[in-house]
Amino acid sequence: MIKIKNTKIFTVNKSCKYHWSKLPKFIEFMENNVLNLEGANLSYADLEDINLEDVNLEDTNLSYANLSYANLEGANLSYANLSYANLEGANLSYANLEGSNLMGAKLEGVNLWYANLKGVSFKTIKYFYNQNISRIKTDHKIYQQSLIGSVGRTITYIPSLNVCWCGCRKGTKKEILKAVDDKYPIEHPINKEYRAIFKHFDNLEKIRNEK
């Protein structure tokens, strides 16, 4: 296992001959070891498309970091600060995000298959749609329906928190339906579609609470 403390992340190019000559060996070494970045300060870091599979990022500061399309499968992000981080398209399958701070984070198109999001404050997440939430572990029941409305949006709804993401719009159920009413008359098929979906979600939540 490699443990890096107080290390700055930087990039090199071909003009940096000494570092460039060492880079292949460094990459080979990193591929065969588990990286531990626990408690590191990576705020504002550009980590787009990086491979951090199984890396320990517990209590790491990743606020405002760009982690779009990063591979974070199996990574330990428990209690990490991911506030306002861009996680669009990232692979977080089997990742542990328990207690992490996702305030203002962008989780559009994220793979959360078997991810642990217990202790996460969902109300503070800015974008949370078009993601794979199969087998997700949370403190709340999450409902999702795709291909809704005129452009086939995805609705993600947490009844116990009364928070909903519909495309790039976030709000309570009442606020989302008000936005639909402002655009479509009550008898319009699209308006009826949204209301039917929310009714379905609420009925499922009621049934599950009876168990």
Image (spheres, helix red, strand yellow):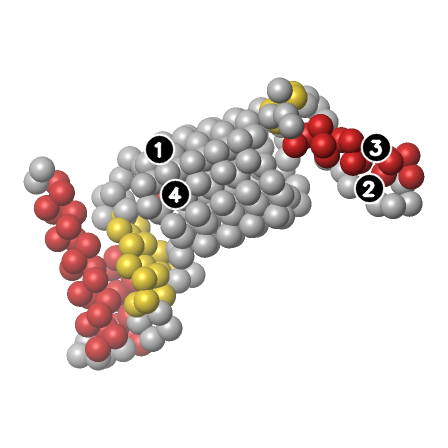
- Residue 196 is marked as none
Give the spatial CA distance, label 4 vs label 1.
14 Å
Give the spatial CA distance, label 2 vs label 4.
35 Å
Name the side, left or right, on which 161 lies relative to 116: left
Q: Earlier in the sequence, mark 3 or mark 1?
A: 3
Q: Amino acid at mark 3?
A: Lys
- Residue 118 is marked as 1
Q: Is residue 34 above or below residue 16?
A: above
Q: Is residue 185 above or below residue 34?
A: below
Residue 69 lies, in percent from the top left, at 56, 50
Check whether the beta carbons of the residues at disc 3 and disc 1 lie within 8 A of each other.
no
Q: Residue furthest left?
A: 210
Q: Secondary structure at mark 4?
A: loop
Q: Amino acid at mark 4?
A: Trp
- Residue 113 is marked as 4
Give the spatial CA distance, label 3 vs label 1.
41 Å
Residue that label 2 marks: 12
Q: Earlier in the sequence, mark 3 or mark 4?
A: 3
Residue that label 3 marks: 22
Mark 2 vs mark 4: in front: 4
Check whether the beta carbons of the residues at disc 2 and disc 3 lie within 8 A of each other.
no
Residue at coordinates 51% horizontally, 47% vertically from top-left?
90
Mark 1 vs mark 2: in front: 2
Residue 10 lies, in percent from the top left, at 76, 38
Check whether the beta carbons of the residues at disc 1 and disc 2 lie within 8 A of each other.
no
Q: Earlier in the sequence, mark 4 or mark 1?
A: 4
Q: Secondary structure at mark 3?
A: helix
Residue 99 visible in the picture: yes
Residue at coordinates 35% horizontally, 69% vertically from top-left?
152
Mark 4 vs mark 1: in front: 4
Give the spatial CA distance, label 2 vs label 3.
11 Å
